[in-house]
Image (cartoon, grey):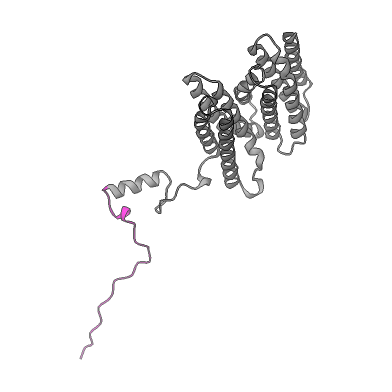
Amino acid sequence: MTSRRPPEKPPVSSAPPAPPSARRTGGPAFYAAQARRALGIDADGALPRLAEIPAPVFQGGMALAASALSLLARPQLVGYAVGIAIDAALILVTCTAILLHARRVAPAGVRPGVEVCVLPAMILASSAVALGGAQSAVLMGVSVVAAGTITAVVPHLEARRRAGHDTLAVRLGLDLAGIVAMLPLVLAGASSSLPAPIGMVLVGAGGAALCYDSLKADDPHSRLAVPGAAGAGIALGLVSRLAVRGSAQGAGAVGLLLLWYGLRGLLATLQRRPRAPVVLVEYSAFAAVALALLVADGR
């Protein structure tokens, strides 16, 4: 008598069932899943992880968005007090997001501190000043795009310089970015229509922030960054009173811009080892010429 063998069960697969979008090769659900994967969004609909977004893209995008939103906070629309409050809130939110992102993407041993927020904060403040005085839509657009571009490009150029790629293109890029960022502030510092304390604070704080960022970019452990930047800012703020008494706002702004450029170059050269005497003389000449122009124009 033969025994009947029970029917064999099919092997059980340990792999999880494929999502509906993977089992189908067409239809709205399939194409929606493909689009989510292309954007870096997982199957649960979560947004891309912060660590997957490059720092220049994140920083530039945040600055671009904040600068565009500050169009709504222009004094012509909401008044000076409300406009300043909105701009301050936008700068605070943007810098907080940039700091959190920088600390998320950086390795544990080299996570940056609040110094990563100095440049974006100054550029957004400069953009707010430019937008507050702009009447042309073209100038407004240029200011918004410049804020996002400088915030994205400058950290990359500074990283290349630290890595030894101190080429002419890198130096020119950093100088041009600094000039574009400082231009609205020196115009404000040389304006007779603003109260003296506001003009002095704008040009002094902006110049100090740019000097600090440049010194820290050259040497993250710089001991000259804080006192040097503070001294440059105080000098720019005090000298801005000479620019106001000048014959034209443009001439005063050019003098303040040359003075900032010379002071920043002097501080950076003093910090580097070995020092280059020729470069010290060059930047000293810029500062001396700027002071001579401001004094002569203010008489």
Occupied quadrant, residue 133: top right
Q: Position of residue 44 (x, y in %)?
A: 40, 54
The magenta-colored residue range is: 1-27
Residue closest to the eye, 272 or 138: 138
Q: Main secondary structure of the magenta part?
A: loop
Residue at 59% across, 25% down: 129
Q: Position of residue 91 (x, y in %)?
A: 58, 36
Up-down relation of residue 66 to residue 39 (above or below): above
Is residue 231 inside the magenta stretch? no
Q: Position of residue 52 (x, y in %)?
A: 50, 45
Image quarter hosting the C terminus = top right
Image quarter hosting the N terminus = bottom left
Q: Position of residue 210 (x, y in %)?
A: 67, 29
Residue at 66% across, 15% down: 254
Occupied quadrant, residue 218: top right
Is residue 138 visible in the rendered structure shown here? yes
Occupied quadrant, residue 127: top right
